[in-house]
Image (tube, rainbow, N blue to C red):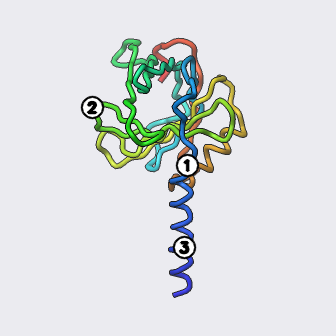
Amino acid sequence: MKTLLLVFGLGLIAAVQAQTLPVMEEDQDVSGTWYLKAVASDKGIPGNPGSVSVTPMTVKILEEGSVEIKFTAWIAGQCQEITIVLEKTDEPGKYTAFGGKQEVYIIKSDVEDHYILYVGKLAGHRIRLAKLVGRDPEINQEALKDFEKVVGTRGFNSKNIFVPKQTETCSPGSD
């Protein structure tokens, strides 16, 4: 019985900690160039994630508080620009994408100029993703440790974290 209470108590503490993570504040200007530093998945990333290359993202805060993210990716033999609009909700740090079908949380890292994008459900599938983004293309070990801590409180295994290669342009070998 004591073991059951201990497990329940620790689970409750972890859940409370996960819910009280700092989120992006409305008055923060995050517009500009950002780099994807690390990706975590609760199910693992299929294929060879170590060979994934990413280009910088351009982030723009829209008038109503929504966030526009643009980046390029090599898809079907072509370099394509992708634009995603994260629509602001009434809950601080919570956004929706794709007509409300996907929830995205923007969590402020304890490390300056770093944020974590947490996707609770990816395109209707039971897979959760978290992405560490930062202003500088270089890996910041302190930010990576903070990312590991945050995703750990959300139930991710640290073995399912990978660091993509940074590239300036989209090309056939970049994904």
Q: Residue furthest bottom?
A: 1
1 and 3 marks in contact (CB < 8 Å): no
Q: Residues within 10 Å of mark 3 (few under 14, many from 20)?
A: few
* Residue shown at 50% from the left, 53% from the top: 19
Mark 1 and mark 2 residues within 8 Å of each other at the beta carbon: no
Query: Percent position (x, y) of residue 15?
Result: 51, 60
Which element carries disc 2, helix, strand or loop? Answer: loop
- The answer to which of marks 2 and 3 sits earlier in the sequence is 3
Number of other residues with Cα within 10 Å of mark 1, as a class: few under 14, some 14 to 19, many 20 or more: many
Q: Earlier in the sequence, mark 1 or mark 3?
A: 3
In the depicted structure, whether residue 44 falls above or below residue 73: below
Which residue position holds label 3?
Answer: 9
Residue 165 horizontal side relative to residue 61, left or right:
right
Disc 1 from disc 2: Cα separation: 26 Å
Percent of width and height locating residue 62: 43, 20
- Point 38% across, 24% down: residue: 84
- The three-letter amino acid code for the residue at tag 1 is Val
State whether residue 29 is above or below residue 96.
above
Kindly identify the amino acid type of the residue bearing the numbered disc 3: Gly
Mark 1 element type? helix
**Distance from Cα at disc 2 to Cα at disc 3:** 37 Å
Tag 2 residue = 99
Q: Residue at x 27, y 31 (%)?
A: 99
Q: Nearer the viewer, residue 133 or 168?
A: 133
Secondary structure beneath dot 3 equals helix
Task: Say which of marks 1 and 2 sits in front.
Answer: 2
**Closest to the observer, 155 or 21:** 21
Horizontal and vertical percent position of residue 27? 55, 28
Asked which quadrant contains residue 81, the reply is top left
- Callout 2 environment at 10 Å: few (<14), some (14 to 19), or many (20+)? few
Residue that label 1 marks: 151
Mark in the foreground, 1 or 3:
3
